[in-house]
Amino acid sequence: MSKKIFIKTFGCQMNEYDSNRILDTVKEIGFFKTNNIDEANCYLLNTCHIRDKAKEKVYHEIGRVKKNFRFKNKPLVIVAGCVAQAENEEMLKREPYIDLVIGPQAYHKINGKIKDYLKKQKRLDETEFDAISKFNFFEKVKNSSQKISSFLTIQEGCDKFCHFCVVPYTRGPEYSRPFETIINEARILAANGVKEITLLGQNVNAYRNENYSLSNLILEIEKIPGILRIRYTTSHPKDMTDDLIETYAKSKKLMPLVHLPVQSGSNKVLELMNRKHIIEDYFKIYHKLKKINSSIKFSSDFIVGYPGENENDFNDTLDLIKEIKFINSYSFIFSPRPGTVASKLELIDRKISLNRLEKIQKELFNHQTEMNKSLENNIIDVLVENKTEERGKFFGKSEYMTSVIFNAKEEHVGKIAKVKINKSNQNTLFGEIVKNTKLKVA
């Protein structure tokens, strides 16, 4: 008899990919996806440990599940992901409602763990680092994603050990999947109807398997019929090699948005963070890419108020933002993560950090708004992904990952449409599909 599993996913794109692969896996033991938590026989929370209070979010969510099932049979409750990896023993002690705790490198064991629990009713955790066995297992489980835009993990883990980052402790050392298995999965996605693939990794441009690199993957996936667009995230400046940069000249399907986290514009702060690159390296990459294609745009990540950051350091970051004009970035106040080097450092006054964050976000949002405004009355290429709840309106993304809402028809889904942009705001473009393309093409 089939059972229902409800999965809630926090955090990065890799967690989304993992959640989808877990769904593909648990079908084999009779669990099928539900979007209605009230009918779930199993509730799985896939967690993220990057930001502060991630652990408390887990307990808050478990509290909601308790409330939902107060007068019904309790579902099997599983906590997965990076918080599970970092806090496994404490979770089982603190919250009796949790039945299983499974780390990111143990998802290939989830069916066995669920069956063991249902048979023995014994709570347990599984947080062993075993990336090779995990990916070997998932090679045998077909990726059933049929979204127009889908994720594909190619690399996992991190060897960089930035002082603020918990990823090496929750995802383990860098591991790159075999080249052919990635290409095979990309072919399966294309056969499913996927049109855009985003290659994922904690350090995606650190991908190395035998003699293959990320540039080889991009150029090989480009040959697959049906794939219209290729993206990758998230990358590190240290691994932005010349062959990858040159791929922007060779590839017709690699999108012209480069997400390259810099974290700070100050060399002093970058050294304190153990980032292993300097700001001059970042500018070299920027200028090389702009020389190849002047329409390439950048997005990034910024940490404000890192321990030791003074006003001059902050102004260096502000100057960097003004010069490069990032069109879509993530910015946060430093959040100490347990077990990292930076967790032991003295924090900057919260008011100072908040003030700096406000200034940086104002600058970032201005660039984002200006970019979107510049597209008004222009025609752009939009990959049509799905219909919205509003009648006659569809959703898609521009080449620069900007959301676009526009008038279209069902026949446009999965295709790249010419859309005239009529208006915009900070995050979204609004327009309509046009048949007459004599207008200016952006």
Image (tube, rainbow, N blue to C red):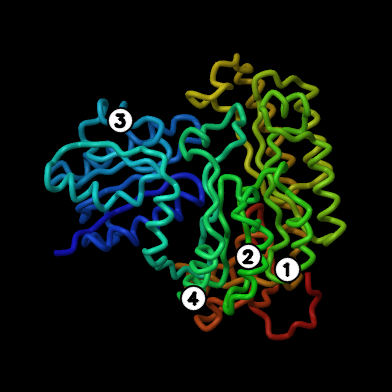
What's the distance in space between the residues labelled 4 and 1, CA to CA?
Answer: 21 Å
Give, as a three-letter code, the residue at label 1.
Ser
- Under circle 1, the secondary element is loop
Q: Which mark identifies residue 251?
A: 1
User: On the rendered image, what quadrant is the N terminus found in?
Assistant: bottom left
Picture quadrant of residue 56 = top left
Residue 278: where, in percent of width, then height?
A: 78, 34
Nearest to N terminus: mark 3 or mark 1: 3
Looking at the picture, which amino acid does disc 2 mark? Ile
Furthest toward the front, the residue is 210
Mark 3 vs mark 1: give the one in front: 1
Q: Which residue is mark 2?
A: 230
Residue positioned 49% across, 67% down in the render: 185
Instruction: Identify which amino acid the numbered label 4 is placed on.
Output: Gly
Residue designated by label 4: 193
- N-terminal of the pair, mark 2 or mark 4, is 4
Label 4 SS: loop
Residue at far top of view: 346
Which residue is identified by label 3?
A: 91
Q: Nearer the viewer, mark 4 or mark 1?
A: 1
Spatial CA span between label 4 and label 3: 40 Å
Q: CA distance from mark 2 to mark 3?
A: 39 Å
Looking at the image, do the residues carrying marks 1 and 2 touch, with CB atoms under 8 Å apart?
yes
Where residue 271 sits, quadrant-wise, is top right
Image coordinates of residue 410 in percent, x first then y, are: 50, 81
Q: Earlier in the sequence, mark 1 or mark 2?
A: 2
CA separation in Å, label 2 and label 4: 14 Å
**Mark 2 secondary-structure assignment:** strand
Q: CA distance from mark 1 to mark 2?
A: 9 Å
**Left or right: 256 with respect to 152?**
right
Q: Give the mark nearer the N terminus: 2 vs 3.
A: 3
Q: Amino acid at mark 3?
A: Met
